[in-house]
Image: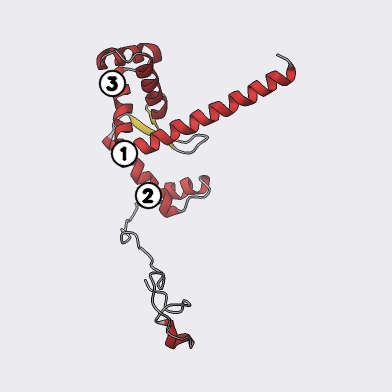
Amino acid sequence: MICPLRRGNRFAAGLAGEQLLKPTLYDYDVVVAKKAPTPVRFDMMVADRLQVFVSVNHGLSLSAAANMLVDEGLRMMEHPGVLFRPGPTGRRAGLAAGPDVWEVVRAVRSARAAEPELGEQELLAMLAENTGVPVRMIRVATGYWAAYPEEIDAEIAAADAAEESAERAWRRERELLGG
């Protein structure tokens, strides 16, 4: 979209009484539109529940909430066994009746680093024994990570940073108290 009244815009010369300026790469404001809206009609009961969801999730518009919930629903269909739940860092992928996906992936990485010679089956068996998470669910978590690595890696990085910060604070307190 061209903004016809912007200073320096070639089309603004006649409209605003400005002199025609030499065009540059910066003469226009360009707005890149998202895909055209997709009209959706919800059943009245669904629309009411969506409105309640928006009212308790401050900062979400009706449209953003619907988009998020549809995305999560599609992801859950792609990765049976994954669900989404709220938490201190926002909504995140977790295993049904189990830990968050990022926790499983971090455990897999840790086990691989500690036992690099283990084969896949041995690694999965060790993880299942040590965590209580069945091998099938570990595979669900790693499959989800493979599809959405940036999301899960960001959650792991945030958890690592929070843990490091908490440990530094604990150490400072121990030093202050002489323990």
Q: Is residue 173 left or right of residue 71?
A: right
Tag 1 or tag 2, which sits nearer the N-term? 2
Between 177 and 99, the one nearer to me in the picture: 177
What is the secondary structure assignment of the residue under circle 3?
helix
Determine which residue is flagged by label 2: 67
Sequence order check, earlier mark of 3 and 1: 1
- The image quadrant where one finds the C terminus is top right
- Please, which residue is most extreme toward the right here? 177
User: What residue is rendered at 30% in x and 18% in y?
Assistant: 135
- Residue 155, located in which quarter of the rendered image? top left
The front one of 164 and 83 is: 164
Residue holding disc 3: 136
Element class at badge 2: helix
User: Left or right: 172 with respect to 23?
Assistant: right
Are the residues flagged by discs 2 and 1 in contact, CB closer than 8 Å?
Answer: no
74 over 126 or under it: above or below: below
Query: Which sits in the foreground, 62 or 20?
Result: 20
